[in-house]
Amino acid sequence: MRRTGLRIGELRNLEYHCIRPDERRPLLKVPLGKLNNERLVPLDADSVELIRRLQAVAPRSRPWLVPGGGGVRMSYDRIRRCLKTYNHDLPDPVRVTSHRLRHTYATEMLRAGMSLPGVMRLLGHRDYHMTLRYTAITPEDCWR
């Protein structure tokens, strides 16, 4: 979620075969999400490796990348509990949430030089005002 800007619902709905090859880099096919749109998100090597490890956990015949018990999708609440468990001992007192990971992704993409419309498309937003709410822009960012 941190490296792709996925929402929990989109993570739950990722298909087992969610990586799409591209000439430059692999892409993650994000299924229909909250705003009823699909999108492709570029993947770095670490994200591809993580997806490959998740695919190796269980048979290829399963429909979802992150399965729950009995072949169904993992529940929204279980993903939230896992995230809470894994960030429990972090030194930062600010609670890490799936939505915070999405905000961090958006901010880093903008700071890395991606255009606002590009970040907007990666997040699946229809309005740039929403994307601006997701990015933490500082005065230093304006003068880069």
Image (cartoon, grey):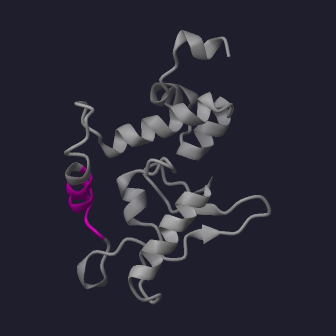
Tell me residue 72's x, y (percent): 30, 78
Magenta run includes residue 77: yes
Q: Please tell me which residue lies in front, 112 or 128.
A: 112
Q: In percent of the image, x 25 and y 65: which residue is there?
A: 75
Report the side of 108 relative to 133 (left or right).
right
Residue 22 lies, in percent from the top left, at 74, 64
Picture coordinates of residue 52 (x, y %)?
A: 51, 73
- Foreground pick, 5 / 3: 3
Magenta stretch encompasses residue 104? no
The magenta stretch is 74-83
Counting every numbered tag in the picture gives 0
Q: Quadrant of residue 120?
A: top right
Q: Residue at x 41, y 85 (%)?
A: 62
State the residue in front, 50 or 27: 50
Residue drawn 51% across the image and 63% down it: 31
**Quadrant of the rendered structure where residue 28 is?**
bottom right
Q: Position of residue 55 (x, y in %)?
A: 46, 78
Q: Residue at x 37, y 64 (%)?
A: 12
Q: With respect to residue 47, does 66 lie above or below?
A: below
Q: Against 39, is 51 above or below? A: below
Quarter of the image with the C terminus in it:
top right
Is the stretch drawn in magenta largely helix, strand or loop?
helix
- Answer with left or right where residue 121 lies relative to residue 13: right
Answer above or below: position of 100 versus 138: below
